[in-house]
Amino acid sequence: MATLYTQVESNVRKTWFFLFLLFSFIIFLGWIFSYILDNNLILIIAVILSFLFNFYSYWYSDKFVIWLSRAKRIEKKDNPRLYRLVENLCITAGLPMPKIYIMPGRQANAFATGRDKNHSAIVFTEGILEKLEDEELEGVIAHELAHIGNRDILLSTILVVLVGIVALLSRFFLQISFFGGGRRRGREERSPILLILALALAILAPLFATLLRLAISRKREFLADATGALLTRYPEGLARALEKIAQDKEPLPQASSATAHLFIANPFKGRQKTNWLLKLFMTHPPIEERIKALREMSI
């Protein structure tokens, strides 16, 4: 039987494996494109552009996401119950108190954002505060604090950078290949087999990188579940919360494809198919699998 500790360790190992795989893929992609086009500047340019773009995202994405959600910041006097639950769990976890926001919407959901534990926020929908009991809400809060403590926000930013590099490399290579621009020596000496491989990689690489990013995102959800359960010492609380969230069919108009991965559960209700192909493109693992994993844990 899996314990909370082995679940956390397993998901950490898998996350770093996927991250290493993505790094290695970028290096290979940069090498083969540079070799075919005889231009070593391709990878350097892509890395610099991606870094500049995601530097802005790292520092300001939390403010943008909160603005998109139309959430309002609250203080202790505005919702003593919620504030007390977050405060107690922060003390247990050894984390500073995040900013707390409430967003309009009857759907039960929540997400964490911010660049690190000292600049973090947790956003709750009005629906989740109405529909969950204290033990269930504690499980959700612990899950979001786990994202903050595990530095998932930083990891998400790194992944955006890496996937951005892959997309830029692929687009740059395709443009040069079809419209010219490679050096004469490279254009004359390149192997037809390598050229076909490079073209195939340029077309498929962004898809492959996106699938890896989603795989890591799903592993981080399992990791946050396990870490949150470790924090409360009561996996059943989060399991029951996820059951209620899964049964809640209320829409959430503020959700978008850009922010869906942040929520504790997919905010697009009615689109949670579980066949193997659709699972590849899901930002979250199926809730049924998360509940099963939580209930199989032992302390």
Image (cartoon, grey):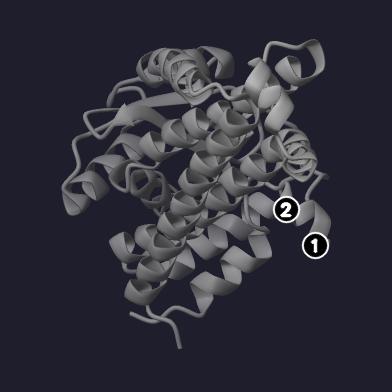
Residue 102 placed where, x, y %? Answer: 47, 25
Relative to 215, 192 lies left or right = right
Question: Looking at the image, can residue 252 be seen?
Answer: no
Relative to 217, 7 lies left or right = left
Which residue shows up at 42% across the image and 52% down it? Answer: 134
Q: Nearer the viewer, residue 179 or 133?
A: 179
Residue 220 placed where, x, y %? Answer: 47, 52
Cα–Cα span, label 1 and label 2? 7 Å
Residue 120 placed where, x, y %? Answer: 31, 29
Which residue shows up at 65% across the image and 59% down it? Answer: 287
Dot 2 lies on which element?
helix
Which residue shows up at 41% across the image and 44% down it? Answer: 144
Residue 173 disc label: none
Q: Quadrant of the C terminus?
A: bottom left
Disc tally is 2
Dot 2, how many residues are within 10 Å of its Cα: few (below 14), some (14-19), or many (20+)?
some
Question: Looking at the image, can residue 125 be seen?
Answer: yes
Residue hosting label 1: 276
Label 1 close to label 2 by CB (< 8 Å): yes
Q: Amino acid at mark 1?
A: Trp
Dot 1 lies on which element?
helix
Residue 81 picture quarter: top left
**Position of 170 relative to 5 (above/below):** above
Which residue shows up at 49% across the image and 37% down it? Answer: 159
Q: Amino acid at mark 2?
A: Leu
Q: Quadrant of the N terminus?
A: bottom left
Dot 1, how many residues are within 10 Å of its Cα: few (below 14), some (14-19), or many (20+)?
few
Residue hosting label 2: 280
**Position of 215 relative to 58 (above/below):** below
Residue 100 picture quarter: top left
Q: Nearer the viewer, residue 139 or 260?
A: 260
